[in-house]
Image (tube, rainbow, N blue to C red):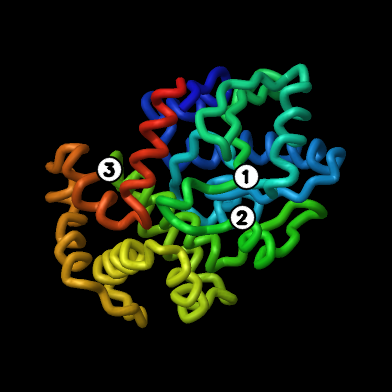
Amino acid sequence: MFPMTDALAMTENSHSTHDSPERTWKLKQVVFADILNDLHGHFTKLNVRYMPIKGAYLICSGLAEKMKYRRMDDIDILVEKDNFEETGNYLSGLSHVTFLREDWYFEKEYVYKTGKFDCHLEIHSLLNYPARFNLPTENLFTRAHPINGLQMAPCLEDALLIFLCHVLVHIGYELRNAFFDEIALISGQPDFSWKKFWDMANTTGVDQFIGMMVHHYATKTSLEINEPPLSFKTKLAGKFLSKNVYCRLPFFFRKLILEIPFVRDPLSLFLNKYLRSKLK
């Protein structure tokens, strides 16, 4: 991640002095909300539909303020494929935006400056390689609803799928303490449907991983959720999610046990990443 400076850095590090993580999170919500409001003006000028995802979604939907704490280091925006290059060219032409890199064909990274704030901004045309999981952008926009003009919000079920698929990407690195809170928050909304969620999860190609994580959540919180059956392999892998076990596992073993067996196409994913590293 690109290091934050000035106010963003202060909000990130303030809990090490006198602010609690909870207060840090409240301050960061204000900072990121201001940046998202600024971005909305640019997307309106472009006349491009866009979808804040992950932490940015929580802020734009008003759900963030219901979370006691969540780590958030950047802003992620999803746009439709036909608008990806146009959006990237427009942002690169702004004096307060610096293009950082484009490691993946579906993601552009920027440093977005507003006043004294530097923010890491990522624009996506796709959430990740289809070899990892299948959540097509066109489907997300079809099921989305407008929040504010061209600003779209994923349906609640998609919001949870995006979150859990993101957990799959990072499961080798970390399993955040706020994991349970985010599942509880999204699935606890009045219009959320577990039946609809499982129907949609079945199309991702990583439904066993999603089922394993939801089962872990349900077990830890003593909730009864109508879950699909898990395979023996999935149940065995799920035992390594225990905090005492997970924290003791080296990074490589976490990936070997909790990530690689669950992605849609491990070989294609490896080749994509290998070829990308060779082209750098």
Which label is found at residue 174?
none
> Which callout, 2 or 3, points at the residue further toward the start of the chain?
2
Residue 133 in the image: above or below residue 125: below
- Mark 2 residue crowding within 10 angstroms, few (<14) / some (14–19) / many (20+): some
**Secondary structure beneath label 2:** helix
Q: Which residue is mark 3?
A: 172
Q: Which residue is mark 2?
A: 137
Q: Position of residue 24 (x, y in %)?
A: 48, 36
Residue in the image at 58% along x and 49% along y:
53
Tell me whether circle 1 and circle 2 mark residues in contact (CB < 8 Å): yes
**Secondary structure beneath label 3:** loop
> Which callout, 1 or 3, points at the residue further toward the start of the chain?
1
In the image, taking residue 133 as reference, residue 60 lies left or right, namely right
Q: Position of residue 41 (x, y in %)?
A: 82, 39
Tag 3: residue type?
A: Gly
**Secondary structure beneath label 1:** loop
Q: Which residue is mark 1?
A: 125
Q: Position of residue 62 (x, y in %)?
A: 63, 55
In the image, taking residue 154 as reference, residue 150 lies left or right, namely right
Dividing the picture into quadrants, the one containing residue 154 is bottom right
Residue in the image at 49% along x and 34% along y:
73
Residue 181 in the image: above or below residue 70: below
Depth check: 205 or 44 in front? 205
Disc 2 or disc 3, which is closer to the eye?
2
Dividing the picture into quadrants, the one containing residue 253 is top left
Tag 2: residue type?
A: Thr
Depth check: 143 or 248 in front? 143
- Mark 3 residue crowding within 10 angstroms, few (<14) / some (14–19) / many (20+): many
Residue in the image at 41% along x and 63% along y:
205
Residue in the image at 27% along x and 65% along y:
216
Q: CA distance from mark 2 to mark 3?
A: 25 Å
> Which callout, 1 or 2, points at the residue further toward the start of the chain?
1
